[in-house]
Amino acid sequence: MTGLKISSDVIAAENEKRAAAHKSDYAALGEKLARSNIDIDTITKKVAEFFVAVPSWGVGTGGTRFARFPGLGEPRHIFDKLEDCSVIQQLTRTTPTVSLHIPWDKADPKDLKAKGDALGLGFDAMNSNTFSDTPDQAHSYKYGSLSHVDAATRAQAVEHNLECIEIGNALGSKALTVWIGDGSNFPGQSNFTRQFERYLDSMRDIYKALPDDWRLFSEHKMYEPAFYSTVVQDWGTNYLIAQTLGEKAFCLVDLGHHAPNTNIEMIVARLIQFEKLGGFHFNDSKYGDDDLDAGSVEPYRLFLVFNELVDAEHRGVKGFHPAHMIDQSHNVTDPIESLISSANEIRRAYAQALLVNRGALEGFQNDNDALMATETLKRAYRTDVEAILAEARLRSGGAIDPVATYRASGYRTQVAAQRPAVKGGSGGIV
Ligand SMILES: [Mn+2]
Protein backbone atom coordinates (compact mmCIF):
# COMPACT_ATOMS: atom_id res chain seq x y z
CA MET A 1 0.00 0.00 0.00
CA THR A 2 1.56 3.23 -1.06
CA GLY A 3 -1.21 5.72 -1.57
CA LEU A 4 -2.85 6.05 1.84
CA LYS A 5 -4.49 9.40 2.27
CA ILE A 6 -4.34 10.04 6.02
CA SER A 7 -0.90 10.41 7.56
CA SER A 8 -0.15 7.67 10.06
CA ASP A 9 1.32 10.39 12.30
CA VAL A 10 -2.10 12.06 12.54
CA ILE A 11 -3.75 8.77 13.48
CA ALA A 12 -1.05 8.01 16.06
CA ALA A 13 -1.27 11.49 17.61
CA GLU A 14 -5.06 11.37 17.81
CA ASN A 15 -4.97 7.87 19.30
CA GLU A 16 -2.39 8.96 21.84
CA LYS A 17 -4.75 11.66 23.14
CA ARG A 18 -7.41 9.05 23.82
CA ALA A 19 -5.28 6.02 24.73
CA ALA A 20 -5.45 6.23 28.53
CA ALA A 21 -9.21 6.79 28.70
CA HIS A 22 -9.80 4.04 26.16
CA LYS A 23 -7.63 1.56 28.06
CA SER A 24 -9.54 2.22 31.24
CA ASP A 25 -12.95 1.94 29.48
CA TYR A 26 -11.94 -1.32 27.82
CA ALA A 27 -10.74 -2.80 31.12
CA ALA A 28 -13.96 -1.75 32.88
CA LEU A 29 -16.13 -3.28 30.14
CA GLY A 30 -13.99 -6.43 30.22
CA GLU A 31 -14.64 -6.75 33.95
CA LYS A 32 -18.35 -6.22 33.52
CA LEU A 33 -18.62 -8.81 30.73
CA ALA A 34 -16.50 -11.30 32.68
CA ARG A 35 -19.23 -11.32 35.36
CA SER A 36 -21.49 -12.80 32.66
CA ASN A 37 -18.76 -15.24 31.61
CA ILE A 38 -18.08 -13.33 28.40
CA ASP A 39 -14.45 -12.93 27.36
CA ILE A 40 -14.11 -9.43 25.92
CA ASP A 41 -11.13 -10.33 23.72
CA THR A 42 -13.11 -13.06 21.99
CA ILE A 43 -15.81 -10.52 21.16
CA THR A 44 -13.25 -7.90 20.04
CA LYS A 45 -11.59 -10.42 17.75
CA LYS A 46 -14.90 -11.32 16.11
CA VAL A 47 -15.83 -7.66 15.72
CA ALA A 48 -12.45 -6.92 14.12
CA GLU A 49 -13.20 -9.60 11.53
CA PHE A 50 -16.57 -8.16 10.59
CA PHE A 51 -16.52 -6.05 7.43
CA VAL A 52 -18.99 -4.07 5.39
CA ALA A 53 -18.54 -2.75 1.84
CA VAL A 54 -18.81 0.95 1.09
CA PRO A 55 -20.86 1.95 -1.97
CA SER A 56 -18.87 4.04 -4.44
CA TRP A 57 -21.95 6.23 -4.94
CA GLY A 58 -22.15 6.91 -1.19
CA VAL A 59 -19.09 9.17 -1.06
CA GLY A 60 -20.74 11.75 -3.31
CA THR A 61 -23.36 14.07 -1.82
CA GLY A 62 -26.83 12.71 -2.57
CA GLY A 63 -30.01 14.63 -3.08
CA THR A 64 -33.74 14.33 -3.21
CA ARG A 65 -36.25 14.76 -6.04
CA PHE A 66 -36.25 18.44 -5.11
CA ALA A 67 -32.65 19.49 -4.92
CA ARG A 68 -29.08 18.54 -4.36
CA PHE A 69 -26.68 20.68 -2.38
CA PRO A 70 -23.12 19.77 -3.39
CA GLY A 71 -20.50 19.52 -0.66
CA LEU A 72 -16.89 20.63 -0.68
CA GLY A 73 -14.33 18.58 -2.58
CA GLU A 74 -16.81 16.12 -4.02
CA PRO A 75 -15.26 13.22 -5.92
CA ARG A 76 -15.14 13.95 -9.65
CA HIS A 77 -14.88 10.35 -10.82
CA ILE A 78 -14.38 6.81 -9.58
CA PHE A 79 -10.69 7.33 -8.76
CA ASP A 80 -11.56 10.20 -6.41
CA LYS A 81 -14.35 8.07 -4.98
CA LEU A 82 -11.90 5.25 -4.28
CA GLU A 83 -9.61 7.67 -2.45
CA ASP A 84 -12.51 8.79 -0.25
CA CYS A 85 -13.45 5.16 0.38
CA SER A 86 -9.88 4.41 1.42
CA VAL A 87 -10.04 7.13 4.08
CA ILE A 88 -13.06 5.41 5.62
CA GLN A 89 -11.21 2.10 5.63
CA GLN A 90 -7.99 3.58 6.94
CA LEU A 91 -9.73 5.06 9.98
CA THR A 92 -12.32 2.37 10.71
CA ARG A 93 -10.63 -0.80 9.41
CA THR A 94 -14.18 -1.97 8.82
CA THR A 95 -14.65 -1.28 5.09
CA PRO A 96 -11.89 -2.99 3.06
CA THR A 97 -14.02 -3.27 -0.08
CA VAL A 98 -15.99 -1.00 -2.39
CA SER A 99 -19.16 -1.86 -4.27
CA LEU A 100 -19.14 -0.36 -7.77
CA HIS A 101 -22.05 0.84 -9.85
CA ILE A 102 -21.81 0.58 -13.63
CA PRO A 103 -21.89 2.76 -15.74
CA TRP A 104 -21.36 5.46 -13.07
CA ASP A 105 -17.95 3.97 -12.19
CA LYS A 106 -16.94 2.78 -15.63
CA ALA A 107 -13.19 2.89 -16.27
CA ASP A 108 -10.50 0.53 -17.51
CA PRO A 109 -10.64 -2.41 -15.05
CA LYS A 110 -6.83 -2.52 -15.00
CA ASP A 111 -6.72 1.07 -13.76
CA LEU A 112 -9.45 0.41 -11.21
CA LYS A 113 -7.62 -2.65 -9.91
CA ALA A 114 -4.31 -0.77 -9.70
CA LYS A 115 -5.93 2.12 -7.83
CA GLY A 116 -7.65 -0.31 -5.45
CA ASP A 117 -4.37 -2.12 -4.82
CA ALA A 118 -2.53 1.14 -4.14
CA LEU A 119 -5.17 2.15 -1.62
CA GLY A 120 -5.53 -1.29 -0.04
CA LEU A 121 -9.10 -1.69 -1.28
CA GLY A 122 -10.82 -4.71 -2.81
CA PHE A 123 -14.05 -4.84 -4.82
CA ASP A 124 -17.32 -6.20 -3.51
CA ALA A 125 -20.55 -6.89 -5.42
CA MET A 126 -21.01 -5.18 -8.77
CA ASN A 127 -24.19 -3.19 -9.28
CA SER A 128 -25.82 -2.85 -12.68
CA ASN A 129 -27.88 0.14 -13.69
CA THR A 130 -30.80 -0.30 -16.05
CA PHE A 131 -32.95 2.28 -14.28
CA SER A 132 -31.54 5.26 -16.17
CA ASP A 133 -30.42 5.93 -19.73
CA THR A 134 -26.94 6.76 -20.94
CA PRO A 135 -26.63 9.16 -23.90
CA ASP A 136 -25.29 6.47 -26.24
CA GLN A 137 -27.73 3.63 -25.63
CA ALA A 138 -30.04 2.44 -28.40
CA HIS A 139 -33.15 1.66 -26.35
CA SER A 140 -34.60 3.69 -23.48
CA TYR A 141 -35.47 2.24 -20.06
CA LYS A 142 -38.30 4.73 -19.59
CA TYR A 143 -40.83 1.88 -19.63
CA GLY A 144 -38.64 -0.76 -18.06
CA SER A 145 -35.53 -2.81 -18.70
CA LEU A 146 -35.34 -6.54 -17.92
CA SER A 147 -39.15 -6.77 -18.05
CA HIS A 148 -39.69 -4.35 -20.95
CA VAL A 149 -42.32 -5.33 -23.55
CA ASP A 150 -39.71 -4.88 -26.30
CA ALA A 151 -37.28 -7.78 -26.75
CA ALA A 152 -34.43 -5.57 -28.00
CA THR A 153 -34.63 -3.39 -24.87
CA ARG A 154 -34.56 -6.49 -22.66
CA ALA A 155 -31.57 -7.84 -24.59
CA GLN A 156 -29.73 -4.56 -24.13
CA ALA A 157 -30.40 -4.67 -20.36
CA VAL A 158 -29.18 -8.28 -20.17
CA GLU A 159 -26.06 -7.34 -22.13
CA HIS A 160 -25.33 -4.53 -19.65
CA ASN A 161 -25.48 -7.01 -16.76
CA LEU A 162 -23.09 -9.34 -18.60
CA GLU A 163 -20.69 -6.44 -19.01
CA CYS A 164 -20.89 -5.80 -15.23
CA ILE A 165 -19.94 -9.43 -14.62
CA GLU A 166 -17.01 -9.08 -17.00
CA ILE A 167 -15.72 -5.93 -15.29
CA GLY A 168 -16.26 -7.51 -11.88
CA ASN A 169 -14.32 -10.59 -12.94
CA ALA A 170 -11.32 -8.44 -13.77
CA LEU A 171 -11.56 -6.77 -10.35
CA GLY A 172 -11.96 -9.87 -8.20
CA SER A 173 -15.63 -9.28 -7.43
CA LYS A 174 -17.75 -12.37 -6.77
CA ALA A 175 -21.30 -11.08 -6.97
CA LEU A 176 -23.71 -9.11 -9.10
CA THR A 177 -26.56 -7.15 -7.56
CA VAL A 178 -29.49 -6.50 -9.84
CA TRP A 179 -32.00 -3.85 -8.88
CA ILE A 180 -34.44 -2.62 -11.48
CA GLY A 181 -36.83 0.30 -11.46
CA ASP A 182 -39.31 -1.63 -13.62
CA GLY A 183 -42.95 -1.38 -12.67
CA SER A 184 -45.95 0.74 -13.52
CA ASN A 185 -47.52 4.01 -12.51
CA PHE A 186 -51.14 3.22 -13.42
CA PRO A 187 -53.45 0.28 -12.79
CA GLY A 188 -53.77 -1.54 -16.09
CA GLN A 189 -50.53 -0.15 -17.49
CA SER A 190 -48.78 -3.54 -17.24
CA ASN A 191 -49.87 -7.12 -17.08
CA PHE A 192 -48.32 -8.29 -13.79
CA THR A 193 -47.89 -11.90 -14.90
CA ARG A 194 -46.43 -11.30 -18.36
CA GLN A 195 -44.16 -8.58 -17.01
CA PHE A 196 -42.77 -10.93 -14.35
CA GLU A 197 -42.35 -13.73 -16.90
CA ARG A 198 -40.27 -11.40 -19.08
CA TYR A 199 -38.19 -10.40 -16.04
CA LEU A 200 -37.53 -14.03 -15.14
CA ASP A 201 -36.51 -14.85 -18.72
CA SER A 202 -34.02 -11.97 -18.72
CA MET A 203 -32.65 -12.98 -15.33
CA ARG A 204 -32.20 -16.55 -16.56
CA ASP A 205 -29.97 -15.19 -19.33
CA ILE A 206 -27.89 -13.26 -16.78
CA TYR A 207 -27.73 -16.24 -14.44
CA LYS A 208 -26.41 -18.44 -17.27
CA ALA A 209 -23.45 -16.08 -17.73
CA LEU A 210 -22.55 -16.09 -14.02
CA PRO A 211 -19.15 -17.65 -13.21
CA ASP A 212 -19.34 -20.73 -10.97
CA ASP A 213 -17.98 -18.94 -7.90
CA TRP A 214 -20.26 -15.90 -8.25
CA ARG A 215 -23.58 -15.14 -6.61
CA LEU A 216 -26.49 -13.26 -8.15
CA PHE A 217 -28.39 -10.96 -5.79
CA SER A 218 -31.81 -9.66 -6.64
CA GLU A 219 -32.95 -6.67 -4.58
CA HIS A 220 -36.59 -5.98 -3.83
CA LYS A 221 -38.08 -2.53 -3.38
CA MET A 222 -41.68 -1.71 -2.60
CA TYR A 223 -42.01 1.46 -4.68
CA GLU A 224 -40.14 4.22 -6.53
CA PRO A 225 -39.48 5.05 -9.29
CA ALA A 226 -42.61 3.10 -10.23
CA PHE A 227 -45.36 4.24 -7.88
CA TYR A 228 -48.28 1.92 -8.60
CA SER A 229 -46.53 -1.46 -8.95
CA THR A 230 -42.97 -2.66 -8.88
CA VAL A 231 -41.84 -5.91 -10.52
CA VAL A 232 -39.65 -7.03 -7.60
CA GLN A 233 -41.70 -5.41 -4.87
CA ASP A 234 -41.15 -7.53 -1.80
CA TRP A 235 -39.24 -10.40 -0.26
CA GLY A 236 -41.85 -12.94 -1.40
CA THR A 237 -41.30 -12.10 -5.06
CA ASN A 238 -37.58 -11.89 -4.39
CA TYR A 239 -37.61 -15.37 -2.89
CA LEU A 240 -39.50 -16.72 -5.91
CA ILE A 241 -36.82 -15.26 -8.17
CA ALA A 242 -33.94 -16.78 -6.23
CA GLN A 243 -35.69 -20.13 -6.05
CA THR A 244 -36.58 -20.11 -9.75
CA LEU A 245 -33.08 -19.17 -10.93
CA GLY A 246 -31.03 -21.68 -8.95
CA GLU A 247 -28.46 -22.21 -6.24
CA LYS A 248 -26.29 -19.19 -7.12
CA ALA A 249 -29.25 -16.80 -6.80
CA PHE A 250 -29.97 -15.08 -3.49
CA CYS A 251 -32.11 -12.30 -2.07
CA LEU A 252 -30.61 -8.98 -1.09
CA VAL A 253 -32.36 -7.10 1.71
CA ASP A 254 -32.11 -3.33 1.57
CA LEU A 255 -33.39 -2.21 4.97
CA GLY A 256 -35.04 0.89 3.48
CA HIS A 257 -37.04 -0.96 0.83
CA HIS A 258 -39.97 -1.96 3.03
CA ALA A 259 -43.17 -0.39 4.28
CA PRO A 260 -42.79 1.39 7.64
CA ASN A 261 -43.08 -1.01 10.60
CA THR A 262 -42.39 -4.12 8.50
CA ASN A 263 -40.80 -6.84 10.62
CA ILE A 264 -37.56 -6.95 8.63
CA GLU A 265 -35.73 -9.15 11.14
CA MET A 266 -38.37 -11.81 10.58
CA ILE A 267 -37.89 -11.59 6.81
CA VAL A 268 -34.19 -12.10 7.44
CA ALA A 269 -34.91 -15.17 9.57
CA ARG A 270 -37.11 -16.69 6.86
CA LEU A 271 -34.52 -16.14 4.14
CA ILE A 272 -31.81 -17.67 6.33
CA GLN A 273 -34.00 -20.69 7.06
CA PHE A 274 -34.51 -21.36 3.37
CA GLU A 275 -30.86 -20.59 2.47
CA LYS A 276 -31.66 -17.61 0.27
CA LEU A 277 -30.28 -14.67 2.23
CA GLY A 278 -27.67 -13.13 -0.05
CA GLY A 279 -26.85 -10.03 1.92
CA PHE A 280 -27.77 -6.52 2.87
CA HIS A 281 -27.84 -2.95 1.83
CA PHE A 282 -27.63 -1.29 5.24
CA ASN A 283 -29.26 2.08 5.82
CA ASP A 284 -32.07 3.39 7.98
CA SER A 285 -35.44 4.89 7.26
CA LYS A 286 -38.29 6.66 8.97
CA TYR A 287 -40.98 6.78 6.29
CA GLY A 288 -39.87 5.03 3.13
CA ASP A 289 -36.67 4.63 1.19
CA ASP A 290 -35.13 7.62 2.94
CA ASP A 291 -31.61 6.15 2.73
CA LEU A 292 -30.71 7.58 6.13
CA ASP A 293 -27.54 6.59 7.95
CA ALA A 294 -27.48 3.05 9.36
CA GLY A 295 -28.54 3.00 12.99
CA SER A 296 -29.49 6.68 13.03
CA VAL A 297 -33.25 6.26 13.49
CA GLU A 298 -33.95 2.72 14.62
CA PRO A 299 -30.79 1.25 16.13
CA TYR A 300 -32.82 -1.40 17.96
CA ARG A 301 -34.15 -2.72 14.66
CA LEU A 302 -30.60 -2.95 13.33
CA PHE A 303 -29.68 -4.90 16.45
CA LEU A 304 -32.63 -7.26 15.95
CA VAL A 305 -31.50 -7.94 12.37
CA PHE A 306 -28.02 -8.76 13.69
CA ASN A 307 -29.55 -10.90 16.39
CA GLU A 308 -30.87 -13.14 13.58
CA LEU A 309 -27.49 -13.15 11.82
CA VAL A 310 -25.59 -14.09 14.98
CA ASP A 311 -28.21 -16.71 15.78
CA ALA A 312 -27.56 -18.27 12.35
CA GLU A 313 -23.80 -18.09 12.96
CA HIS A 314 -24.32 -19.69 16.37
CA ARG A 315 -26.38 -22.51 14.85
CA GLY A 316 -23.74 -23.04 12.15
CA VAL A 317 -26.19 -22.64 9.26
CA LYS A 318 -24.76 -24.29 6.14
CA GLY A 319 -23.31 -21.93 3.53
CA PHE A 320 -24.17 -18.85 5.59
CA HIS A 321 -22.09 -15.92 4.43
CA PRO A 322 -24.24 -12.87 3.73
CA ALA A 323 -22.67 -9.94 1.90
CA HIS A 324 -22.67 -6.72 3.91
CA MET A 325 -22.94 -3.47 2.00
CA ILE A 326 -24.01 0.04 2.88
CA ASP A 327 -26.48 1.85 0.61
CA GLN A 328 -27.19 5.37 1.76
CA SER A 329 -27.69 8.89 0.47
CA HIS A 330 -25.98 11.68 2.36
CA ASN A 331 -27.66 15.01 1.89
CA VAL A 332 -26.66 17.14 4.87
CA THR A 333 -23.43 15.56 6.14
CA ASP A 334 -19.92 15.00 4.86
CA PRO A 335 -20.45 11.58 3.22
CA ILE A 336 -17.13 10.29 4.58
CA GLU A 337 -18.23 11.08 8.14
CA SER A 338 -21.63 9.46 7.58
CA LEU A 339 -20.04 6.31 6.20
CA ILE A 340 -17.53 6.14 9.05
CA SER A 341 -20.33 6.49 11.55
CA SER A 342 -22.54 3.98 9.72
CA ALA A 343 -19.79 1.38 9.54
CA ASN A 344 -19.36 1.80 13.30
CA GLU A 345 -23.10 1.49 13.94
CA ILE A 346 -23.25 -1.72 11.90
CA ARG A 347 -20.37 -3.18 13.88
CA ARG A 348 -22.01 -1.98 17.09
CA ALA A 349 -25.18 -3.93 16.28
CA TYR A 350 -23.05 -7.00 15.55
CA ALA A 351 -21.09 -6.64 18.80
CA GLN A 352 -24.27 -6.24 20.84
CA ALA A 353 -25.83 -9.27 19.14
CA LEU A 354 -22.73 -11.30 20.05
CA LEU A 355 -23.43 -10.52 23.72
CA VAL A 356 -26.88 -12.15 23.72
CA ASN A 357 -26.93 -15.13 26.07
CA ARG A 358 -28.37 -17.58 23.54
CA GLY A 359 -28.66 -20.50 25.97
CA ALA A 360 -30.66 -18.40 28.43
CA LEU A 361 -32.79 -16.99 25.61
CA GLU A 362 -33.74 -20.45 24.40
CA GLY A 363 -34.61 -21.48 27.94
CA PHE A 364 -36.91 -18.50 28.39
CA GLN A 365 -38.52 -19.19 25.01
CA ASN A 366 -39.18 -22.81 25.95
CA ASP A 367 -40.60 -21.72 29.32
CA ASN A 368 -42.84 -19.15 27.63
CA ASP A 369 -41.21 -16.49 29.77
CA ALA A 370 -41.76 -13.63 27.35
CA LEU A 371 -40.56 -10.95 29.74
CA MET A 372 -37.20 -12.55 30.48
CA ALA A 373 -36.72 -13.54 26.84
CA THR A 374 -37.05 -9.96 25.67
CA GLU A 375 -35.01 -8.76 28.65
CA THR A 376 -32.19 -11.07 27.51
CA LEU A 377 -32.09 -9.22 24.20
CA LYS A 378 -32.37 -5.83 25.88
CA ARG A 379 -29.55 -6.60 28.28
CA ALA A 380 -27.20 -7.16 25.34
CA TYR A 381 -28.54 -4.14 23.48
CA ARG A 382 -28.11 -1.84 26.48
CA THR A 383 -24.42 -2.72 26.80
CA ASP A 384 -22.21 0.15 25.72
CA VAL A 385 -19.77 -1.65 23.42
CA GLU A 386 -17.95 1.47 22.23
CA ALA A 387 -14.71 0.34 23.89
CA ILE A 388 -14.86 -2.96 21.97
CA LEU A 389 -15.35 -1.13 18.68
CA ALA A 390 -12.48 1.25 19.47
CA GLU A 391 -10.19 -1.60 20.49
CA ALA A 392 -11.00 -3.52 17.28
CA ARG A 393 -10.09 -0.44 15.23
CA LEU A 394 -6.96 0.25 17.26
CA ARG A 395 -5.63 -3.30 16.98
CA SER A 396 -6.06 -3.13 13.19
CA GLY A 397 -4.27 0.19 12.81
CA GLY A 398 -7.36 2.41 12.78
CA ALA A 399 -8.49 5.28 14.94
CA ILE A 400 -9.95 5.17 18.46
CA ASP A 401 -12.22 8.03 17.40
CA PRO A 402 -12.39 7.92 13.58
CA VAL A 403 -14.60 10.98 13.00
CA ALA A 404 -12.49 13.20 15.26
CA THR A 405 -9.32 11.89 13.60
CA TYR A 406 -10.80 12.52 10.15
CA ARG A 407 -11.59 16.10 11.13
CA ALA A 408 -8.12 16.57 12.59
CA SER A 409 -6.55 15.28 9.35
CA GLY A 410 -7.96 18.14 7.26
CA TYR A 411 -8.66 15.71 4.40
CA ARG A 412 -11.81 17.46 3.22
CA THR A 413 -10.07 20.85 2.99
CA GLN A 414 -7.18 19.30 1.08
CA VAL A 415 -9.38 17.63 -1.51
CA ALA A 416 -11.58 20.72 -1.81
CA ALA A 417 -8.50 22.56 -3.08
CA GLN A 418 -7.76 19.81 -5.63
CA ARG A 419 -11.31 19.10 -6.79
CA PRO A 420 -13.10 22.12 -8.19
CA ALA A 421 -16.81 22.33 -7.44
CA VAL A 422 -19.07 21.02 -10.17
CA LYS A 423 -22.69 21.92 -10.73
CA GLY A 424 -25.18 19.06 -10.47
CA GLY A 425 -23.43 15.73 -10.68
CA SER A 426 -24.91 12.28 -10.47
CA GLY A 427 -26.65 11.21 -7.31
CA GLY A 428 -27.78 7.69 -6.72
CA ILE A 429 -30.37 6.11 -4.51
CA VAL A 430 -30.82 2.44 -5.28
MN1 LIG B 1 -30.08 -0.79 -2.24
Image (tube, rainbow, N blue to C red):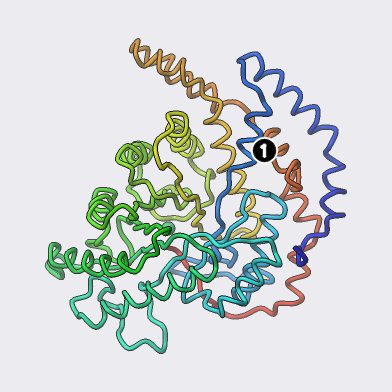
Residue 277 drawn above or below residue 75: above
Of residues 411 and 171, the one nearer the viewer is 171
Q: Position of residue 199 (x, y in %)?
A: 23, 66
Q: Where is residue 291 in the image (x, y as percent from the top left)?
A: 47, 55
Residue 242 drawn above or below residue 381: below
- Seen from this angle, which residue lies furthest top? 367
Determine the image quadrant of residue 86.
bottom right
Determine the image quadrant of residue 354.
top right
Q: Where is residue 230 in the image (x, y as percent from the top left)?
A: 25, 61
Quickly name the residue at label 1: 389
Give me the residue at 37% from left, 86% from top.
Answer: 137
Residue 15 drawn above or below residue 198: above
For label 1, count other residues whose C-alpha is less than 10 Å away and answer few (under 14), some (14-19) or many (20+): many
Give me the residue at 56% from left, 58% from top.
Answer: 54
Of residues 119 and 101, the one nearer the viewer is 119
Question: Image check: 64 left or right of 193?
Answer: right
Determine the image quadrant of residue 248.
bottom left
Ligand 1 located in image quadrant: bottom left
